[in-house]
Image (spheres, rainbow, N blue to C red):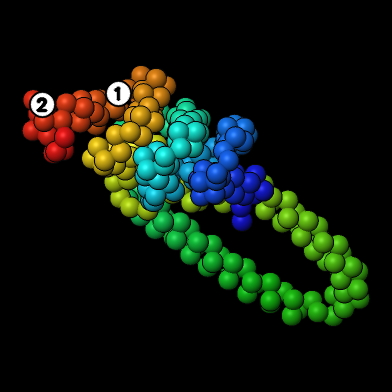
Amino acid sequence: SKDPLFRCIELGTRFISETISYAKEKEFIPDFTSSLMELYSKHIPACKWLLQSLTDNQRWIRRLLLACSSKKSRSCFALLLEHVVTCLAPFESNFYLEFFNDDNSVEDSTMSDVVVDDDDDNKNNNINHEDNNNNNNREENNTETENDNDNNDSNSNNEEENKDEKEEEKKVDVIEELFKPKRPGQSKSVIVEFFNRYMDILKDCRFYWRNFVKYFMLYKSFAMIGPNERKWLLSRNVISRLIDFYLGNDTPLNSKYDG
């Protein structure tokens, strides 16, 4: 159900994150990352897929931004994340502070059921009328069956071709189905969901103080995108949390971090 471009992006991302970043020779990682970034620029659903995957499983973030000892691997993965967030931000910046309400989805589903039921009743009535008419006109239609069969064969072939074309057009829509809300109160923005989980790693950064620079650079890159991004950071007290983390035991706040 995935289109070829999405498959290439997914495979390339997994290759960088799980294979090439741990290779002994890393000279071609920047070029490979640059090519992958160009593909992400052409496929917004793939940007959603990556952030959603990192939201559900933070393994890549912890390994490649904190635990990884290779500066080049950390830099390339951080650059890829910054690019994906920057590509997706224009499509989500207007609803960073909005959330899904499950009441609307329930109402929509019930109304669609009613429409389907009414259509089914009408279809059944039409079928009954058609059966009565067919019984009365069987003798007149016997001479026309051969021509009708030929027409039906040509029509069926056209219908199959049309179905193939429609399936090709709906490939992106199939990918979009992956990002529908799965719980009430979920943010309408995949970026917001990602950063909510991304901030959970902050308390562990103190154990990787030699490598955590790229982790904090993503906050800066996000803030530099525009005013809506900075407004959301302020609404979540991200700046205060970062200052609190930096000051450690000297913070004037009652920090939940132990420095």
Q: Position of residue 171 (x, y in %)?
A: 62, 49
Q: Position of residue 174 (x, y in %)?
A: 57, 51
The quarter holding residue 94 reads: top left
| Residue at the image position 32 percent from the left and 22 percent from the top | 230
Question: Which numbered disc, 1 or 2, marks the residue that appears first in the sequence?
Answer: 1
Label 2: few (<14), some (14–19) or many (≥20) C-alpha neighbours in 10 Å: few
| Residue at the image position 41 percent from the left and 56 percent from the top | 109
Q: Is residue 198 above or below residue 178?
A: above
Q: Which residue is mark 2?
A: 250
Q: Position of residue 4 (x, y in %)?
A: 67, 48
Quadrant of the snapshot with the N terminus: bottom right
Residue type marked 1? Lys
Q: Is residue 44 above or below residue 152?
A: above
In this view, the residue farthest toward the front is: 24
Of labels 1 and 2, the one closer to you: 2
| Residue at the image position 44 percent from the left and 61 percent from the top | 113
Tag 2, which secondary structure? helix
Q: Which residue is mark 1?
A: 231
Residue type marked 2? Asp
Q: Is residue 65 above or below residue 181?
A: above
Distance from the alpha carbon under mark 1 to that under mark 2: 27 Å
Q: Would you say 193 lies left or right of 8 here?
A: left
**Closer to the camera, 96 or 131?**
96
**Closer to the camera, 200 or 96?**
200
Q: Position of residue 58 (x, y in %)?
A: 37, 47
Q: Would you say 205 lies left or right of 111 here?
A: left
Q: Would you say 169 lies left or right of 175 here?
A: right
Q: Would you say 63 lies left or right of 44 here?
A: left
